[in-house]
Amino acid sequence: MPLVKKKSHDNICVFESFHGDVTYSNEIFEENHISKPFKSLIEEWLKVALEWDPKLRGRDSPSKVTFDIPSESKGVASNVVIYNMLEDILSKKIIKVFSIPTISNLAYEIQDITTVETLKTWICKDINIPVEDQILISQMNCTNISNDEFVLKYHNENSSTMLFVYNKNNMLGEVSAPFVPKSVQRCLELPKSLYNYRNSQDLYHSAFFFVIAQMDMYDALINGIFTRAECLKLESKQLLVKHNSVDKSLGKLLAQSEILVKMREQGQEHIESLKENSIGTNFLGGFSKIFKDSDEYLEKIQKLNNAWSQLTVRLQSAVRRINESMSSDLNGFVTKYNYQNLFSNAYKTFISHKKSDFYNNNREKEKQCPEIVKICYDCLKLRSKIIQDLQHQQFLIKLKDLSTELTKISDIIINATDNTERLNKDLVCLFDEFNTCVWSTISVAIRDADNLADVPYSVVSFQKRDFKIGDSVSSHCIPVKNKFDNTVRSLITESLKIRQNHTNLCEKLNSQKQLLQQSILDFSFLNN
């Protein structure tokens, strides 16, 4: 007790080192199953609660205590805060996160308004995984948590692990080094060292804590892998729902495209027929652009349909692989690597040590502790084997590949949704444009049928909506192909000349005939 009496206000722990030196510490031992935020909070409370002088203990300002001080000399009195501090500590909310890539425990104090995005920034500082590459999944419902949600929703005091964090790019990354107590480190470095009763007690307690901590870490790792697999199954079901919704919209788009194909084929056949007969070609200039646009839209729809068919196959394959049982592979791995035998041996060794003569009678002697040293060595060796073998397991590689595949499929479905909606709007506009062009053509033909019959083609302008006479020829007019070569032209020219000469000759003959029929001379005098 005299040694404890010498401690300062900030000292909350007094202990003897391996060599018997007295050490004062401002921190509690890390060999406790508590989180870092709670450790820092309880350390501040212990500084107040473990004050040596009872007059100063539990107060906020030990230097301002007013006991036995005359009333006229008293300043501001200190307050008893130990209970308020404890109540405040117990009201704190601490979220516990297990990192799969680094195989480590994380913990953070949260408020009611703390968002997932804020939590990810804290995680990024601790394990160096960018915020955009982090995936947070709740063990309660196996869902991927969005950044705008509040973390308080997933707080559960009865759960040792509330959230799992993953890396999108790698299931396992740079694994953090395990926490090894100092006494365990010493026994591994110097396995043949002699231990007195006090040091052996410290070694056995620390070693047993080390085995339990590694076993809990391994259980959290297996649960995290299983949770990720369940989350992928849920994501695949949600993608199937989105896929079916887009598939219905695409089916409606294909039905409209069939109508467009029929309209385009009939329209082009009718226009070709009119061109061959040279009938009404002056009125058909606006339809060429519509048919050209329809070809472009039909090509886009066909490409979208082909890509969608390939996506459907990819999604079905991904869903099939996800639904394939990975539990058998995972169970086989757990059967091969587990801490149960190691824990049983550690427990038996610990109980045997407590029942030994060294523990009960011969406490002054020193001896080696080979049994517990071997258990500590086996624990580290098993952890190393698990990490090394886990990186090459097929179920872990499959989870990574399926996660990447579902992310790509989700992006493609979003793009397909946007393209389908845009093409639907384009087809509606195209049908409206076609109807407008048809009725405008009919209106012009009815209104100006008599006048347009005598108007040369070069002075007729066909606009998309209003057909005006006298303007320049629109670009929508269909140019008539010249089907005659020079030889045919010369023949036609000669034929026209011959016909013209024949016409002139016929006119002369008719005029002569009319002259002969007229009585120009008078022969009536012969009758006398």
Image (cartoon, helix red, strand yellow):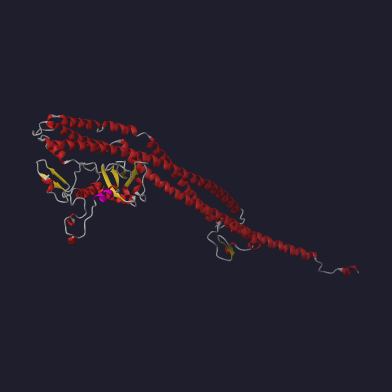
Residue positioned most to the right: 528
Q: Is 353 situated left or right of 227 in this image?
A: left
Q: Main secondary structure of the magenta part?
A: helix
Q: Quadrant of the N terminus?
A: top left
Residue positioned most to the left: 365
Segment colored magenta: 82-87
Dividing the picture into quadrants, the one containing residue 138 is top left
| Coordinates of residue 3 in the picture (x, y in percent) | 11, 46
Dividing the picture into quadrants, the one containing residue 240 is top left
Residue 434, compared with residue 187, is above or below; it is below
- Residues 425 and 154: in front is 154
- Residues 458 and 83: in front is 83
User: Does residue 129 appear in the picture of this structure?
Assistant: no
Q: Is residue 202 magenta?
A: no
Q: Residue at x 34, y 48 (%)?
A: 152
Q: In which quarter of the image is the C terminus?
A: bottom right
| Coordinates of residue 105 in the picture (x, y in percent) | 26, 43
Q: Is 492 situated left or right of 322 in this image?
A: right
User: Does residue 273 appear in the picture of this structure?
Assistant: yes
Dividing the picture into quadrants, the one containing residue 369 is top left
Image label count: 0
Q: Does the magenta stretch include residue 85?
A: yes
Q: Is 101 situated left or right of 520 in this image?
A: left
Q: Is 365 situated left or right of 421 in this image?
A: left
Q: Residue at x 27, y 45 (%)?
A: 106
| Coordinates of residue 310 in the picture (x, y in percent) | 43, 42
| Coordinates of residue 516 in the picture (x, y in percent) | 78, 64
- Residues 62 and 383: in front is 62
Residue 506, compared with residue 55, is above or below; it is below
Q: Which residue is drawn at 71% across and 63% down?
A: 507
